[in-house]
Image: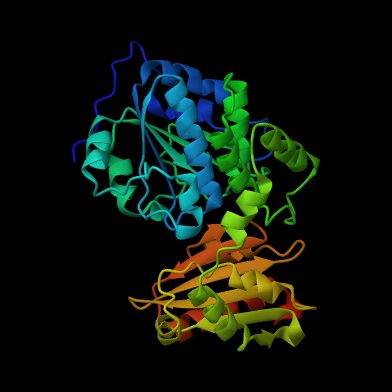
Amino acid sequence: MSPARRPRRARSAPRAARRKRSVSRAGSAAPRFRALVPLLRRGRQAVLSTHINPDGDGLGSELALAAFLRQRGLRVAVINSDPVPRLYAFLDPRGDILTPEAPAARRALETCELFFAIDNGTLSRMGALQEWIRATRARRICIDHHASQDDVWDLRLIDESACSTGTLVHRLIRTLGGRLSPEQATALYVALITDTGYFRFARTDASTYHLAAELLEAGVDPVQVYHQVYERNSLAYIRLLGVALGSVRTEAQGRVGWVSLTRQQILEAGGEQEDTSEIVNSVLTVEGVRVALLFKELPGPRTKVSLRSKGELDVNALARRLGGGGHRNAAGILLSAPLQNGIERVLAEVRRLGPEFS
């Protein structure tokens, strides 16, 4: 598909200089959302996307932002490499979120003037869209709270201290004078609760609860949202949870706990389409465990690894050494390796976290 043509701009600064001025780095002031205003005035067609295997933060953030951009008169398409997971389908009842092969998605990409990467700044996690992103002449904007970023974005609105990308999208909408509908508030509430582990992860603070209160005042039904997200597990997921937890192993005198799921176990449970990443959180609840790991065998052969930690232990740094990423206490890796090899490689890196893990 051909990249969209950008509108002509008079006496524009060099691209590298424009990018440098528009970056908000960790530890700096809040992202400069007003830098978006001239882009929104010039652009008419926007495309939003999040990472592969979209989660509540990515989906909720892009849906809330898409609605805001439509309020400002833009034509907007939300295009993700992977379909919406079953647990989050209630956020998109009309099925507006597209995948790249849909004809409407192809048309939107061909005419795109503004591209927003939401909750992800790493091209390798954009799936089928990554080569299009490299080639497009559309303005590329990244809104994210992760440390891992590729240097392809024209405008980066990044705050690593934020508990969710939904928090940043809320700030953006408020800064630019937007008002939240109940649907937008619900989308942002899902972003907030899923990326804070329902208000229990380290970056949860008073501002997190203030935002939750504001979203409830805007029309969120917290009982219904909790039911949709946390009380609709499939029988296949429950079976996989039992298989995994029935085989917990420990290392380093109980400081490391890990479980694995083979392809055969996944298929026997009928759980090939299930998001199993939450299983690792149960391992972290074991007394004494400070690092928890879930190894999931994928076709390829590949191994998906979910990592969690407590306190100051940085599993994001560990994940980045193996091509993954995330946050200090929650990260992920996709290894092009068989399951057993993946387990050995990751456990070797865990032993480098400190003498108490060796």
At x 39%, y 51%, the residue is 126
- Does 293 sit above or below residue 229? below
Q: Nearer the viewer, residue 297 or 318?
A: 297
- Does 306 sit above or below residue 89? below
Left/right placement of residue 202 relative to residue 278 reads right
- Does 154 sit above or below residue 149? above
Q: Can residue 54 be seen in this view?
A: yes
Residue 350: percent from the left, percent from the top? 63, 75
At x 33%, y 10%, the residue is 10
Q: Can residue 32 be seen in this view?
A: no
Residue 17: percent from the left, percent from the top? 45, 25
Q: Which of 142 and 222 is in front in this view?
A: 222
Quadrant of the drawing holding the N terminus: top left
At x 52%, y 22%, the residue is 35
Q: Which residue lies furthest to the left in this view?
A: 1
Residue 90: percent from the left, percent from the top? 49, 49
Left/right placement of residue 20 relative to residue 337 reads right
- Does 162 sit above or below residue 324? above
